[in-house]
Image (tube, rainbow, N blue to C red):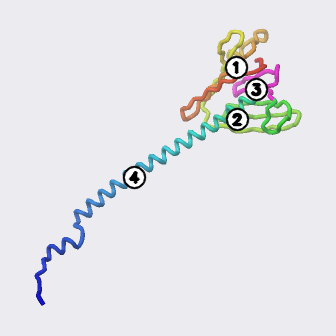
């Protein structure tokens, strides 16, 4: 048997990592994990923005569709009333009961919400639907068919009885808390203000 002398220094180096190597590995792992966390956080934020935007688009589509149907089914020769909180008119478009006859439809823009209320005095019912929240302000303008110009709600309300004119359309601007502004433009068939 022969004995070979062992070199202690070479076997100790191959047995594990030095403290410096472990620390460098931990620092690099930490940097990599923080970059992954930032990318994942940005991805989650983008996903929430897209969902919120899609939700707003869906609610706006529903609001436009209902308002359009209300106005396209307006009762001929009836007035479109506009006040400090919104619009009121008679329409044959009822969401609550189909073919129920004319209902009084009110679009209410008060209390930072957009609501649609329909009432039927004949059938004795009232139904309210909350369509959107976070409404900061709203502005309504009418297209005067005689002068072919947009006039404000206050100008339209200030007209005298003999000075009434037919309105062709209205323009509704909705401003929301998140800074988004939406403009709805609708033709009013048969209506007089």
Label for residue 115? 2
Q: Secondary structure at mark 1?
A: strand
For disc 1, the neighbor class at 10 Å (few under 14, some 14 to 19, many from 20) is some
Mark 1 or 2, nearer chain start: 2
The quadrant in which residue 156 appears is top right
Please, what secondary structure does the residue beneath circle 4 have?
Answer: helix
Q: Is residue 40 above or below residue 119?
A: below
CA gap, disc 1 and disc 2: 21 Å
Q: Which residue is mark 3?
A: 72
CA gap between label 4 and label 1 equals 53 Å
Quickly name the residue at label 4.
36
Q: Earlier in the sequence, mark 3 or mark 1?
A: 3
The number of numbered discs placed on residues in the rendered structure image is 4
In the figure, 113 relative to 79: above or below?
Answer: below
What secondary structure is marked by label 2?
A: strand
Q: CA distance from mark 4 to mark 3?
A: 53 Å
Mark in the foreground, 1 or 2? 1
Query: Residue 27: x and y, percent?
Result: 29, 57
Mark closer to the chain start, 2 or 3? 3
Whichever of callouts 4 and 3 sits on the residue coming sooner in the sequence is 4
């Amino acid at each position: 048997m022969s004995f070979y002398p062992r070199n202690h220094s070479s076997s100790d180096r191959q047995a594990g990592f030095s403290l410096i190597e472990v620390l460098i590995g931990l620092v690099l792992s930490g940097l990599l994990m923080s970059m992954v966390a930032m990318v994942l956080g940005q991805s989650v934020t983008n996903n929430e923005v897209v969902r919120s935007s899609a939700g707003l688009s869906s609610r706006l589509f529903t609001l436009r569709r209902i308002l359009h149907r209300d106005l396209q089914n307006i009762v001929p020769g009836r007035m479109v009333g506009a006040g400090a909180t919104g619009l009121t008119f008679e329409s044959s478009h009822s969401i609550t009961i189909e073919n129920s006859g004319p209902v009084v439809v009110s679009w209410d823009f008060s209390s930072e919400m957009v609501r649609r209320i329909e009432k039927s005095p004949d059938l004795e019912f009232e139904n309210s639907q909350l369509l959107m929240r976070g409404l900061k302000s709203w502005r309504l303008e009418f297209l005067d068919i005689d002068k072919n110009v947009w006039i404000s709600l206050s100008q339209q309300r200030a007209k005298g009885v003999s000075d009434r004119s037919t309105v062709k359309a209205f323009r509704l601007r909705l401003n929301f808390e998140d800074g988004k502004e939406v403009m709805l433009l609708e033709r009013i068939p048969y209506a007089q203000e």
